[in-house]
Image: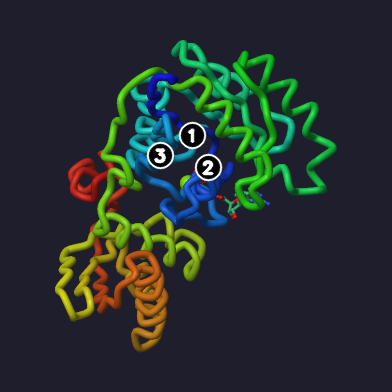
Amino acid sequence: MSAFKAGFVALLGRPNAGKSTLLNRILGARLSIVSAKPQTTRHKIVGILDGKDYQVCFLDTPGLIPSPSDPLQRALRRAAKQAAQDDADIIVLLVEPEKPSAADLEELGGLSRSGVPVILALGKADIEARKPFHDAALKAYAEAVKPAAVLRVSGLKGDGVDQLLREVVARLPESPALYEPGQLSDRWERFFAAEIVREKVFELYHEEIPHATAVVVEHFSEQPGRPDEIAATLYVERDGQKGILLGKKGEALRRLSDRSRQAIEAFTGRPAVLDLWVKVRHNWRKDPKALAEFGYL
Ligand SMILES: Nc1nc2c(ncn2[C@@H]2O[C@H](COP(=O)(O)OP(=O)(O)OP(=O)(O)O)[C@@H](O)[C@H]2O)c(=O)[nH]1
Ligand SMILES: [Mg+2]
């Protein structure tokens, strides 16, 4: 009988590379929020996959922003770097199917200096128009990263995901399970409710709004025989942004609330009542106190 294996596997890459989509595909669950806009993920999130003789604890991370321009972006970078340097037993580096810039090679190549094995995964491999770039991209990254394994994946379609999992499991250290078997994440429903509202903000609003919005769940109560009661506050940076979130006669906010509630209900499998409030917290992305309060530090 082979010994039980378990460990942390950090999913790393630039913003928008498809890390959260890949994690959700591996787990078969919508754990980490996804959007078409970069800088969607703002937290390290553990997604746990239990096998017969292994447990893989994937860490979804905020995309590595090339040049962070405010304290929030710096905190996101730190969280991703920390996952690579302190937490990971294995790194899965997910890259775009295009030729990397010198800055990409320097930064993403530098991640391997931590001494943990790196699996280089070229993502979005389903996109036909980008296939001509695969070989050149893989060659350039492989030279910089010195990966332990190289493969192509599509988090969206699922291609290559089994192979990725095999490569990961083969390199897991021997260890007892790190989390209670059957537990999907280290986070609780309250956290996911806030993330789901944030995902809907990314879907429904544009320009600076998604990145200027933080969501705090103030209240979450589950009672037998009754819908969950959830209250959340959306924090934006300026009065004008509050007006945009609300929309004419509060219509936009009602739409956000409806969509968020439906998604939360799909996630928990229970009916819910959702109350959303909007507050201004001036320049919160530059305010370490606010960043700590919102869980980003
Ligand atoms: N065609 C295609 N699109 C993908 C794939 N994976 C992700 N995408 C799309 O790429 C966009 C970004 O996906 P995310 O999973 O949010 O990317 P991320 O790396 O987690 O982004 P951040 O959290 O901002 O760092 C979304 O529009 C996804 O639908 C893929 O395998 N194929
Ligand atoms: Mg993400």
In the rendered structure, the answer to whether residue 163 lies left or right of residue 177 reads right
State if disc 2 and disc 1 touch (CB < 8 Å).
yes
Distance, label 3 to label 2, CA atoms, is: 19 Å
Q: Quadrant of the N terminus?
A: top left
Residue at image x 15%, y 68%? 221
In the rendering, which numbered label is found on residue 11?
Answer: 1
Q: Is mark 2 within 8 Å of ligand 1?
A: yes
Q: Position of residue 247 (x, y in %)?
A: 39, 80
Location of residue 189 with respect to 56 vertically, above or below: below
In the rendered structure, the answer to whether residue 131 lies left or right of residue 171 reads right
Q: Which image quadrant for residue 105? A: top right
Distance, label 1 to label 2, CA atoms, is: 6 Å
Q: Which image quadrant for residue 282? A: bottom left
Q: Amino acid at mark 3?
A: Asp
Nearer the N terminus, badge 1 or badge 2? 1
Residue at image x 69%, y 14%? 143
Say which of marks 3 and 2 sits in front.
3
Which residue does the numbered mark 2 point to in the structure image? Answer: 19
Crowding around mark 3 (Cα neighbors within 10 Å: few <14, some 14 to 19, many 20+) is some
Which residue does the numbered mark 3 point to in the structure image? Answer: 50
Residue at image x 52%, y 45%? 26
